[in-house]
Image: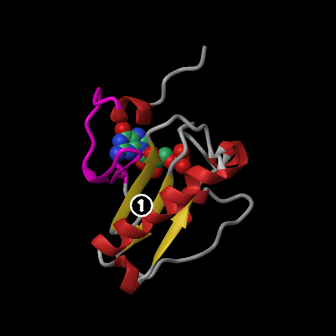
Amino acid sequence: MREVTIFEKIIAGELPCNKVLENDDFLAFHDINPKAPIHILIIPKVHVKNFQELKPEVMSGMTAFIQEIASKLGLDKSGYRLITNNGENGGQEIFHLHFHLLGGAKLAWGHFEDADPKGSF
Ligand code: 5GP
């Protein structure tokens, strides 16, 4: 049986989070180890391992939810980066789908083969 992820425990209320926005289907909260002045994690409440396993119809609601967060935080005007790490080579550490929404500064770019991808956010 697979291990329940930290994010599923957050959804269940078994672990705390610094919540930004929630609806029936999705939850957004601040990353515990921010890589930008604003670093939000956005997750579906239904368990999905990663983007590769995401049903396109779930993405529709998720898109509107992410746009709502960006507007709420004023990032719709200033700009932001949206990332999802998929699988081992993508640098995924928590196997419950999440999007990283990064903003609040002009972000550097550069994801090199041998570099830590997290260091270049
Ligand atoms: P991944 O590497 O899977 O794409 O990203 C996992 C993210 O989850 C990392 O940015 C990490 O800082 C964040 N994270 C790990 N544990 C916790 C936690 O308990 N609470 C919160 N808010 N973020 C977490």
Which residue is disc 1 drawn over? 65
Specify the amino acid type for callout 1: Phe
Q: Nearer the viewer, residue 18 or 68?
A: 68
Q: Position of residue 63 (x, y in %)?
A: 51, 63
Could you tell whether 83 is left or right of 69 in the image? Answer: right
Which residues are drawn in magenta? 12-33
The answer to whether residue 56 is seen in the rendering is yes
Q: Nearer the viewer, residue 16 or 35?
A: 16
At label 1, counting other C-alpha atoms closer than 10 Å, the crowd grade (few under 14, some 14-19, many 20 or more) is many
Residue 59, quarter of picture: bottom right
Q: Position of residue 108 (x, y in %)?
A: 53, 77
Name the residue: 36% across, 44% down. 24
Name the residue: 45% across, 65% down. 64
Q: Classify 66 as above or below 29.
A: below
Q: Secondary structure at mark 1?
A: helix
Q: Classify 64 as above or below 24.
A: below
Q: Position of residue 117 (x, y in %)?
A: 61, 58
Name the residue: 33% across, 69% down. 37
Could you tell whether 68 is left or right of 20 in the image? Answer: right
Name the residue: 38% across, 85% down. 78
Could you tell whether 103 is left or right of 63 in the image? Answer: left
Q: Classify 27 as above or below 40.
A: above
The answer to whether residue 121 is seen in the rendering is no
